[in-house]
Every structure is written in C-alpha cells, then in structure tokens.
Amino acid sequence: MSQREQFKNGLLAKGRGKSNALRAWIYAILIVLWLCIAGLGGPTFGKLSQVQTNDQTAFLPATAEATQALGWQKKFLTTDAIPAVVVLTGNDVLDESDVRALAENLSEFTYLDGKVAGPFLSDDAQAAELLVPISGDTKAKLAVEELRSLLADQKPEGTTAYVTGPAGFSADLAEAFGGIDGVLLGVALVAVLVILLVVYRSVLLPLVVLMTSMVALCAAIVSVYFMASEGWIRLDGQAQGILSILVIGAATDYSLLFVARHKEALIAGASKWQAVSTALRNSLEPIVASGGTVTVGLLCLLFSDLNSNKALGPIGASGIVFSIIAALSFLPSVLGLLGRAAYWPFAPKKLGEHQQVEGEVGLWGKIAKFVAKHPRPIWMITIVVLFAGALGVTQLKAHGVPQSELVVGGSEAKDGQIALGQHFPGGTGSPATVIVDEANAQTALEKVFHVQGVNSAYLQAEDGGPAIIERGIEPYEVQGRNLISVTLSDAADSDEAKESIVRLRQAMHQVNPQTLVGGTTATQIDTNATAQADLNKIIPTTLAAIFVILMLLLRSVLAPLLLMLSTVLSYGTAMGVSALVFNNVFNYVGADPSVPLFGFVFLVALGVDYNIFLMTRVREESKKWGTYAGMRRGLQVTGGVITSAGVVLAATFAALGVVPIMFLGQLGFIVAFGVLLDTFIVRSLLVPALVEEIGPRVWWPSKMSRKDTAMKAENVGKVSGDSTPMRRSSQT
C-alpha cells in the first residue's frame, strides 16, 4: 500500500472515530434526557388519582336531560353533600330507641355535612335506614371508611350495618381502582418480562426493552396529568388503567420490531453504529405508520359525546406517541452503546460464522410454503370459521351494567343495596328527580302517582323534606321551578327502573315539554343512548381514517381494503366469542355500552398494526422478488417478531383482569383474544392466502400491480432456499 493510500485510510479512520464518538455522545444525551423525564413521571404517577373523576353524570354531554336535571337539582340544594345510605338489619324486630341512639352518635362523624335523616323503619321493623350527608369536598373513600368503622363500633348488638347509596358505591369503586397504581402495572411488567426472556434468551435485552416501555409511560403520565389538571380532559380510573397497559404493550411491540431489524443488521456484519442506523432506516416507516394508525384511531374518540370516551382519545394518543418516540430514540441509543453485548449470552454472529442458510428450515418458512401451496382452501376455511365466531355477537348484552355490578365480586355497597331492597321500596336512597315549572307542579305530581313503577313522590320543601301546604310548608321554588322527588318501586339500577323512568319522562313531557327527569336511573339511560350514538358515529369515522392511512402507506387501494375487511371480521369474531364467554363462563349480567366501541377502536387499530408490520415488509420484498415470492419472504422473516408482539400485547391487556372492575376485565379479554386472533389467524393465514390468491393485483392501482405474474414461478425457489440463499431470520 502506498504512503498516499495509508494517509487517506488514516484520515478516514480518524473521521470515523470522531463520528462514532459524536454518536456516542448523542446517544448518552438522549438516554439522560429520557431518564430525567422518567424521574418526573414516577412521582406524578401517584398523583393521577388527585385529578380523577368517576362520576358518571360528569361524562354526559351538557345537552343530556339527566345533566340538565342535575344542574337544576344543585340549585335546590344548600350543600354539595353526597348521600350515604346506612342500612341496619336484624333477625328480630329492631329497637327503635337503639336505632335513634345510633343516629345521634353519628353526629361525631368527621365528614358529616348537615344532619342525619332518619331513622326510617321498614314495615316489618327488621330494618332501618339512615341518610348521612357526606361533605362533597372530601374523597368518598376516606369518608365511607370512617363511617363504616364508626358503625362497626356503635351499631346495636345483633345487627348488621351497611353503607350503600351513592357514597357507598363511589367508595367501593375507588377501592377497586386502587389496584391500578401498583398491582396492574406490576402484573403487566412481569408478564412482558417473562415473554421477552423466552423470545430473546438474553439477560440484558429484555430489561432494555422494558425500560423503553417505562420511560414512554412516564412521559405519557406527565402529559396526561398536565391535561387533566388544566381541565382539558376528564380523567377516570378506567382511562388510567388503559393508558398503562396500552403504553407497555405498544412500546414493547415497537421495540420488538426495531430489535429485529437491529439484529438483522448485526448478522449482516454491520458495526454497532451502522446497525442502529440501518435498523432506524428500515423500521422507521412501519413503526411510525402503525403507531400513527393507532393514534388516529384513538383520536377519532374525540367525536364522542361522552366525555369519558372523548378523554381516552388524547390520553391514549399521547401514550402511543411517546411509545413511538421512545422506541426510536431511547432504545436505539442504548443499543448503540451496548452493541452485540445487549444480546448476551446469545449475541448475533456475522453471517458465515456458524450461520446456516435458511431455506425451508424454520416454522415460519414452513407456514409460508404451506399457505403458498393451498391459498384458496385456507382463506375460505378461515373466513367461514371467523364468520361462525362472529355470530355470537348477537348475544352481547351491552345495554349497561347495574351500579351494584360494576365491581366484580362482593362489596358492602352491593350487599347493602340488596338488604335495602328486601325491606324497603327498591328505589329508596336513589330517587328520581323531576324539575317542573311552578305553574304545572301540582298537575305533574298527580301524574307521577299514575306512572307504573312509582312507589312514592313529593314536592320538595326548602329543607329537602316533603312540602305540606296544609301545615304551611310550601314547595321550594327556584327561578320559577319546583322539584319533585320520586321513589321507584324497583332498584335504581335495574331494568325495571329504567322502564319506569321512560314512562315517567313520557308523562312529564305531556305536562310540559320543558320538564326534566334526572337521577341515577335517568343518567344510566342517557349514558346508554349516548354510547350507542357514539358507536354509530365513530366506527365509520375510524374506518375511513385508517383506510386513508393504509392507502398512503401501501400506495394501493385493494390491499388496504383487504386488510380493513379482514380486521373488521376479526373484530366481529372477537366480540362474538367474548359475548358467549361473558354470558356462559363468567356469568356477567351485561356489559357497559362503551365496551363495543373501545373494543372496536383498539382491535381495528392494533389489528391493522400487525398487518402493517407484515405488508410493509411484503411490499419491500415484492419490489425485488415479485408479489408471490415477496409475500412468502415477508411472512417468513416477520413471523417471529409479529407473533412475539401479539403475545406481548395480549398479555398486557389480559392483565386488566386483575382489577376487579367489570368494564376493564371485559375490555381486557376482548382485546387480548382479538389480538391473538389477528396474530395467529388473520395475519398468518388469511391475509397471506388472499394475497397469494389475488397476486400482483393486490397493489392496484400502483405500478406494482402490473408486474408479470410469471415472477411467481421464477422466484419460488429463491424464497424456499433452492437457488438464492436467504439469511436466517433474526426471530425465534
């Protein structure tokens, strides 16, 4: 080598050294920045409960009749107290003096806001009811805990005391949501860690991927806390739980895809610096596209009229955005510094060093070859099976869940509600309210008594009790309106009570169309109606938005249509099977009306995710090999990583089952089952078989659709290993 060439090589080596040093500094700075964000997000996680609200009425639109009635009802109240219903039962007739003594002792209750009303004895004198107003400025959970402790010490001997009503149910719901802060996150992380250990057979790499998920979650938490504290969104416990699961699952999925490309580059002989650059270049489009699809799908929830649904849009979208950023910045930075050491003890070796040629070897190579040989029977049988599963959707009872069933398992509020219904009219403690103009108040009251399902009713006086004109106790008037308190014969959260409210509204609107009927039951009715309207509006919006993204990504119309139809069919199957499981295995009484909507948004967006991972690689390979060979090659090299991603996401959503909230448990099952269905059936069999059947026309109207189908015969051998060697896939 001449001196000139040596000098030139020396300059190049020196330049590479400086470039690598600069990269190392950039990687280190990015890691430090993310760790600083994590330092902010950790403490903020525990503060999210401070900006939560789980009041169902707060999520209804302002135009809902129940919301308007509540606004007027607050004007009739001198306090914002939350009523707690104390139910006292005994095997024998209760001593009224003992019950009155208990009522007097409750004056010691710290959170008492006003006077204890009662006791009211049942007709059989074996039960008594006390109404305890709890200060609205305090957390219901703290107040109810103290009240229950006080009752345990002071209740008459031989009696059982329950705290139920709005305050009791709120406290039990808050107790159930308490597991979100620690238990849910811990279970999800352990599940993901176990899967990653199996996938990578490495000690360090699973921890790096988990750390990527955690820094993304911390960043999302800071963002969500800021939005909630500023009043931009209404955060509830359900959305908080979904955020944690969504970020852990999505960030891990994107990390799996990046690591797969990084490992491929290392096997090809790239340096640790080149491997990161190559992996970024090859994984950027599918990660951003898949994450963008989920983000757009979630943001479609902004069209919802329910504030709880609307809030999940920006909450979930922020989680996905930070998952993308972390997977494309924090993870590459760590892998850039660690290089092959991240994969210890099974560090990838360069091609040629004990690296076999992958032909027909490997599970996904065999699956790809099997699908290529029998495409038509595979897609026909698969569609029939999926349609059969989808038939179960007719059994889905998504018409709302009684308040007493929101928490899975037993709760004191639920037991108290049952005891109350055994001795008092079912609607006791949760009355319906009628807001009527003063001129029609008496007429309205008379009509109320003729409504089937009404037990009792009265015009409310200023002290909250009944107005008795003969005694000079006039109805309380606010801005020309009176309030009628209506006790129903059935429990406020029962189907019978809902039917009674429908009849009551019809009767009251005949008196005056401006009359408003509100209360617990009316709120449930309006929530169900709004949720159904959301479903009809958001589903087509989401489908249209995702379809446009797929067209831009794949430069095709037919391929996106194929992917969307297969994903929607998969969603229908997941909902149908879930309905059968809910009814016959878990024996759930029903489902929240938002369950089908959330299930749709997550399953369609996340299901398309895996198809994006697959089809972007298929398109890349098809440019070089043709559609038929490209399909097989794409399935073969992405099979492992997409399967791992699907199992991870299913495991994280399944973790929602540890929180004893029916809505979260149902959503977790639907998404987990649906993701596995997409992973193992739709993406592995249905989509590849349809592409094999359609051929290059799947890329219509792009130029790729006009390539000669003769490439099928030409390239079959190359993909199967008979002619052109194919590097071993980096996946297990």
Image (cartoon, rainbow, N blue to C red):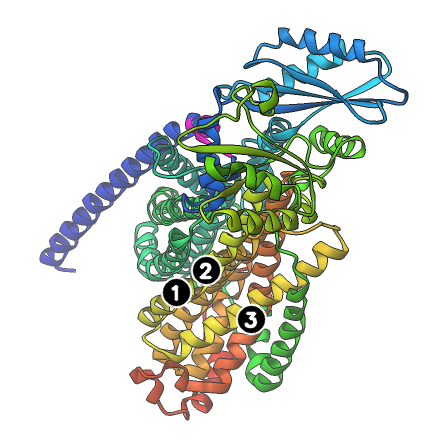
Q: Earlier in the sequence, mark 2 or mark 1?
A: 1
Q: Examine the rendering and report whether any part of residue 352 can be seen.
A: no
The residue sitting at 69% across, 7% down in the picture is: 105
Pointer 1 and pointer 3: residues touching (CB < 8 Å)? no
Residue 206's label in the rendered image is: none
Q: Examine the rendering and report whether any part of residue 528 can be seen.
A: yes
Provide the residue designation for mark 3.
569
Q: Earlier in the sequence, mark 1 or mark 3?
A: 1
Q: Is residue 50 left or right of residue 402?
A: left
Q: In the rendered structure, which segment of residues is drawn in magenta? A: 44-54
Task: Determine the CA span between mark 1 and mark 3.
Answer: 15 Å
Image position of 154 with respect to 307: above or below = above
Pointer 2 and pointer 1: residues touching (CB < 8 Å)? yes
Q: Earlier in the sequence, mark 3 or mark 2?
A: 3
Image position of 210 with respect to 674: above or below = above
Q: Residue furthest right?
A: 92
Provide the residue designation for mark 2.
605
**Viewer-closest of 589 and 382:** 589
Q: Crowding at label 1, few (<14), some or many (≥20) Cα neighbours within 10 Å? A: many
**Viewer-closest of 484 and 602:** 484
**Viewer-closest of 282 and 249:** 249
Image position of 698 with respect to 140: above or below = below
Q: What kind of element bears circle 3?
A: helix
Residue 546's label in the rendered image is: 1
Q: What kind of element bears circle 1?
A: helix
Could you tell me the amino acid type at mark 1?
Answer: Ile
